[in-house]
Amino acid sequence: MERENIPDYENYEQIKISSSLDETLTDIRTIMGNTMDLNILEIEISGVKCAVIAIEGMIATLNISQIVYKYLMGFHADNADCKTVFDFVTKQSLLTNDRKTIYTYGDVVRFAFSGFGIIFFDGLAKAVALGIQGYDKRSVTEPTSEVNIKGSHEGFIEAIRSNISLVRRRMKTPALRFELLQVGTSSKTDVCIAYIKGKAPDKYVDKVRQQLKDIKLETVLTSGYIAPFLESGKKRLFSDFSSTERPDLFCAKLTQGRVGVLIDGTPFAIVVPALFSENFISIDDYASKPYYTAYIKALKYFCFFITIAMPGIYVALATFHPGTFSHKLLLNLAVSEEGTPFPLYVEVLIMMIFYEIMREAGIRLPRAVGGAVSIVGGLIIGDAAVSSGLISVSILIVIGLTATASFVIPSLNEQTSVLRLIFIIAGGLWGLFGIGIAIALVLSNICASENLNVPYTSPFSPLKKDKLVNALARRSFFTLEKTSSKISDLSSSREE
Amino acid sequence: MNFTIAKNIGIIAAVGVFLISSIYAPRVNIEDRAIVHAVGVDKAGEDYEVSLQVFSTTQSGSNTPIDPSQPNMKVISAKGKTIYEGVKNCELILGSDAFIGHNKLILFGSSLYSEELDSLLDWFRRENENYLGVAVAYAENTAKEILEAPLTEGAMAAENLEGVIKYAVDSGTTVKSDLLTLINDLSEEGGCGALPVISVIEEKNSESGSQQQEQGGSQSEQQSGKYIEIKKTAILKDKKAVGVLDPSQTAGMLWISGKMKNCTVSLKSSDSSFNVRLESKKTSRKINIKDGRVVLKVNIKADLRLMEDVSEKTRSEAVGLARERIISDCKNASEAVIETLKADGLGIMKGLRASCPGFYKQNVGNYEKILEHMIIEISVQSSLST
Amino acid sequence: MTRKISSLQFVVTMFFMIGILTITRPSAENTNLLTDIISSVAAVLIECLIVLPAVFYSERYNTSDPVRGIFETNTVVGKILCVFYAAFFIYAAINSLGAFSFFLTSNFPELSKSWAVILLMCAVSLYASCLGIEALTRSSVFVGAIFAALVFIVTISVTGEYDVDNLQLMFPFSENLPGDIFKETLLKLGRSSEICALPFLICHVDKNKKTSVFYFLAVKLGFTILVLLAVKAVLGGYSQKIFDPFYTLSTYARISVIERFDAIYGFVWTLGAFVKISVLFYLGGMFIGYIFPGMKNSASVSIATAVSFAVAVFIVSNNMWDNAFLRSAHWTAVVFLGGIVPLVALLLKSFKTRKRSFDK
């Protein structure tokens, strides 16, 4: 009799496992197209026909042979049937920590590709998945993007379960919850929602869960694929979620009642909601004195302003409002611009583009060649351009300061790079009026961001005086002892 | 074509057109501006001769700062029916826009003493770029001569000019007069005010030519040195200059007006001459009406600092001498300004308006009569500070 | 869904609505300081009375604005009122656009042409007003901080130039002081177009509505008097001959690193004008949306913007800006739209509520 519902690679999710082992194995081979990394081992356990499937390279061979095969092959029972063997595997033995009973081919595929070994029993329409992952993964190293001095030097890695353990180690509370989802119609990437029950409002968690479930992408390879779906609106210059490689920072944000999302295959975790002021926070802030933290934060805010606006303001003032400069400065500028062939704003644009090219080259080049970039950059941008009369010295100073300031806030690199160019064009075309228009645009765009009812510009606007300390400095630990701060305190009151 | 595509194309086209049109907006690059340090105006027949002292870059190229040892200014002159026309003709000579945003001085030559300052300042008042706090002064001779005087080497010309004026004001040698103050003074009844008078002093160098050549001195050192000096003050009435005060009278005027900061005077005691520095601590002015006459009571408190070692006797006399000196200066000033020139250079009418508005209102237009019959009472308290 | 804004956001937004940077514009050359101060105080006191119905209305009927309240009673009257309000706010926007463009192009002629200034300002204000009242009011707080910094620096940097003798309250002497004060008060009232916007912004404030309104009026009065005194003390009689005395004060102020503040003032006023014009577009679009209920918010705001842009460009291009009508509204419009309509709405709604409870 011909079977109905023969599964194939497009239609297998909901189809139940067959009780006949031969049929099951045939179905699996059909679904996976006899892929070369599919290993099927047919064995007999106490006279019952079984099969173990695993994906080559995903499981720890040593584990499967020592823990699974050796142990299972040692099982003998009188009149054993498939149920007896199943009960032994599931209830009477301690093979692995991670052990799940699965019923559909969808689960079979998902667990097999997650590094589980799956045992099928002839006569049973279910299987057991054992967690014996042994795929190659990077060891926990220092985060590449968020460097600090006094804090932890551990960073997330690509394996989601390792990341989960990094978080769990730091928050030994039963209130810390993880929920695993699969996102991506083809990739079925493991995505884990992390939150602390009682801190994160349920509606936040529900919303994030729903947003993730609504993603219809085929593949999810990095956090960047998921991030737009967690943002509050399209066409926002700044992201109202934050992304971190650091487990300590991740835990700190969860403690504030936010919801975190870990994605398998990428070391960057996403946390929602985020505030603009958090771009100026680092974990070192909590290892330093409050006055020093206040000073460093003021410096960072100033650097942010410099990196975005200084070239544009310089161009605007020099071209349209030279009377604003002090007398000596104006004379020096006039002398330095005397011999250059291009108008000021063209010079600044050229140098900014040079800088962006050098910066991008420095990121993409292999490390061995990286040193050459700095030499070439120094030669081209520095000495040669000035000596040849292409640009003036004052522009070098402006660009150099802008570039250095941009390194202080690496998390805003994308935004600062683009906005800087916009400000230069605005200043070069319409002077400080153009700068005002640009700031108005950027400001209204930033102020419109609101994720999970939390305005992105909080605690500045709407002003929350008690939370302002955190944005401008940091709270003392004695204050933190008495009061805990929650992100939901910053939510805007609204009648729905 | 669907609406979204059409909308996007429309937006891009509009932005493109707008940006391109903005590129052609009239803008002047910084290196194309002639930075004016000072503006001088003289009368040349029926026309005005406008002289602009302009910053000149002698070090071109982009990797050297301004070298203060090089001459860094040039003076351009041109005539015009109005001052504005004169400036425009200067721009034609320069071949660039004159930027007066950093103008430090407006100088009127002696040929303009009898012209109303109001009309002379018209263009400066209307020009947005012009700074309201720019110093205004008269030249003892021609404005062009002052602007052309090569000031001491080793300093930037503009800063030197401004510095000289500021120093003269701070040391009580002349009055502070910026454009704003002058406009307000000229709009008062009588159009009275005061302006510094700048002169050029020429000093001949006595060193021999060969010696100088051995030392590698510059040509100008071998021949002569020109310096500017501010020691006089012009008094304005009906918006014109009517007279000039000497340093002692100027000092007195500053004391009475309450605008003296400090000054250095030479006193003579019974056994020696010595210098003292007088610092104004507080000056209070009260205007009352007594028997139909305006009485101005000025109470001056000053600190006295000896600038050299003196005998005990001289020290004991110093306070009294200083007090007498201040009173004498004030008397000289009131005689010169009020009695001789009949001008309200002491701000009497303004003070009268504030303290006795009723009396002022009754006597609007009669300021000369008021000044003629007014009484000034000066009291000075000075103390020696160690 | 009703948007909610904080008390501070409300106060700062309303502050920018008063066109603060031209608030010291003298109405006549012979207005003395005493007249200015007394008329400012009188105008604010009258405004306190005018805004009371709007405040009570919004406290009692949290989610509604007065026009909505009238709509519920009579749709036709409601629509007529909407037309009035929409026209008023568009008129105020035209006024602001024209004043801003006039100021910018006359003081900074190299920057851009008038039509370009108006176009840019309309474009950015349209974008901001489409984002909603919350985004606008949040932006206004940042703009307010920048403005406060400018005012502080300018007033401190000219400290050495303050001359008490310039503060002559009675000069130039007035022939009829009470008459002048009365005229000035009405003129100031007419320039207070923000009073008409108040009932439609106060309904968004989450708490302390009454305090917010009176804070705003106090800040307005305090700032007016501070600027009047500062300008007069430094500029003296010259302040009465110029269009925008505070701008002139900025050109006079200097510190060691900044030679003059006029360009910075222009920059800050660009931001202030942006806040004001965006709110006006938002309100104009809101009322157009009431008239045509099916219309999307962005469409109604776009209509308000387009009309404002077209008329403003026409007026400025034809040098019609000297016309007094174009400079400020009549005080009766402010009283009617800012006070009488909310009062009527309050009475109608109270009557309706009482009738409903009586029927029950």
Image (cartoon, coloured by chain):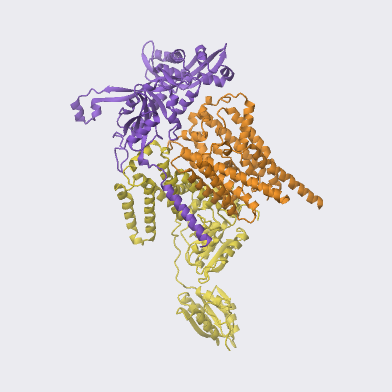
Q: Nearer the viewer, residue B135 or B261?
A: B135
Q: Which chain is purple?
A: B
Res. C110 image quadrant: top left
Query: Is residue C111 shown to the viewer in this render?
Result: yes
Residue drawn at x 52%, y 19% is: B349
Q: In the rendered image, which quarter contains the C terminus of chain A?
A: bottom right
The image quarter in which residue B84 lies: top left
- Which image quarter holds the N terminus of chain A? bottom right
Q: Looking at the picture, how far across and down is residue A246, in whole percent?
A: 49, 59
Q: Position of residue B372 (x, y in %)?
A: 50, 12
Q: Residue furthest right?
A: C359
Chain rendered orange: C
In this rendered view, identify the residue nearer to me: B268 or C266.
C266
The picture places residue B271, in percent across and down from the top left corner, at: 36, 11
Residue found farthest to the front: C318
Taking A81 as reference, is A260 above or below it? above
The answer to whether residue C14 is left or right of residue B265 is right
Residue, far left: B210
**Which of the two residues, C191 or B304, is positioned nearer the viewer here?**
C191
Q: Nearer the viewer, residue B351 or A285?
A: B351
Chain seen in yellow:
A
Q: Position of residue B276 (x, y in %)?
A: 40, 19
Indicate whether B78 appears above or below A27. above
Residue B305 seen by the camera:
no
In the displayed structure, B214 sits above or below B385; it is below
